[in-house]
Amino acid sequence: MAELPFFSVIVPTHKRASLLRRTLASINAQREGVGGVEILVVSDATDGDTDAVCAELLTPADMYVRRNGAPGPSASRNMGLSLAKGSYILFLDDDDAWYEGFLAALKDQPAVRQGLPVYFNCAIVNERRGADAAILSEGGVDMAGRLTDEIYLKNQIPVCCFAFPRALLAGLKFDVHMRAYEDWEFMLAVYARQKAQHVPVIGARIFKDSGAESERRGVSQQSHDYNAVFDYLYVYRRHKAPDAELGQRRAALLNSFNIPVTPEMV
């Protein structure tokens, strides 16, 4: 019987083969000495270029799935969760990457050796894509101390900055009906089960395209328009504020968008 991998990395993708190549290359560079890594690429569209990149860069230990249904990262991540076999699960978007040596450093952390959920540091990389592609700037972000009950008010940490024991996620799914903030809603469900610990490791390189804001899922116009504010209300109703003060702040935030709610409603 084959030994199960230590890490499962779930990568949702949608017709961005050139960016996916960078993502997969950065994961492949992490395989040595970490007790096994499986990559689960889930595409929500038929795309020959994506097929070619996965055929080139994935190993027999990995999996590439072209799923049916509506496009979107939530359903793709959910499929990845249903297939993952690793002791720890990480999520990485198809336009992001990891720093060299990240997984080895992560596995060496005492909290990971104890099987605890953890979150880690990242860097924000501004780049220009296209024929004149270039890295414009890059800066590290220390996430220490950022995961608090403030998560009940707004999102705090990108999902790509977490490593979760697979057992902790049993039964949890990303909400496929949300227009935006589905990562945040998922994180609240995890947080209610067990709070992650910070580890002093830099992991994700989160790339932002300076020339096409709508390119990146989660910062598109769809995630900022009036309709998306109702996703905040939806999240608030699903995840009760832990104290009255946060309930009041939730109501004040929604009131600022002309949504008349009271603290008791959120």
Image (tube, rainbow, N blue to C red):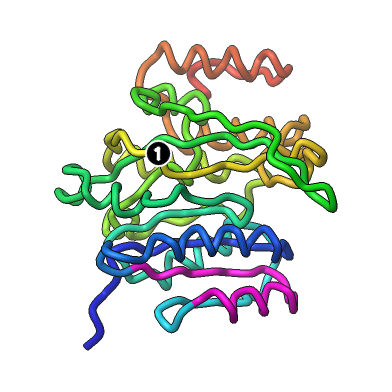
Lateral position of residue 98 relative to residue 217, left or right: left
Lateral position of residue 1 relative to residue 81, left or right: left
Could you say which quadrant of the image residue 68 lies in? bottom right
Percent x, y of residue 258: 73, 17
- In this picture, is 152 found above or below 89? above
Q: Quadrant of the N terminus?
A: bottom left
Is 192 included in the stretch rendered in magenta?
no
- In this picture, is 82 found above or below 254? below
> What residue appears at the point 61 percent right and 57 percent down from the top-left corner?
94
Lateral position of residue 215 relative to residue 103, left or right: right
Percent x, y of residue 126: 67, 35
> What residue appears at the point 46 percent right and 65 percent down from the top-left corner?
28
Is 57 included in the stretch rendered in magenta?
yes
Lateral position of residue 85 relative to residue 25, left or right: left
- In this picture, is 29 found above or below 64? above
Amino acid, disc 1: Ile
Which residue is outermost to the right?
131
> What residue appears at the point 42 percent right and 30 percent down from the top-left corner?
240
Neighbourhood count class around disc 1 (C-alpha, 10 Å): few under 14, some 14–19, many 20 upward:
many
Name the residue that disc number 1 marks.
202
> What residue appears at the point 70 percent right and 45 percent down from the top-left corner?
216
Percent x, y of residue 199: 29, 36
Numbered range of the magenta stretch: 37-58
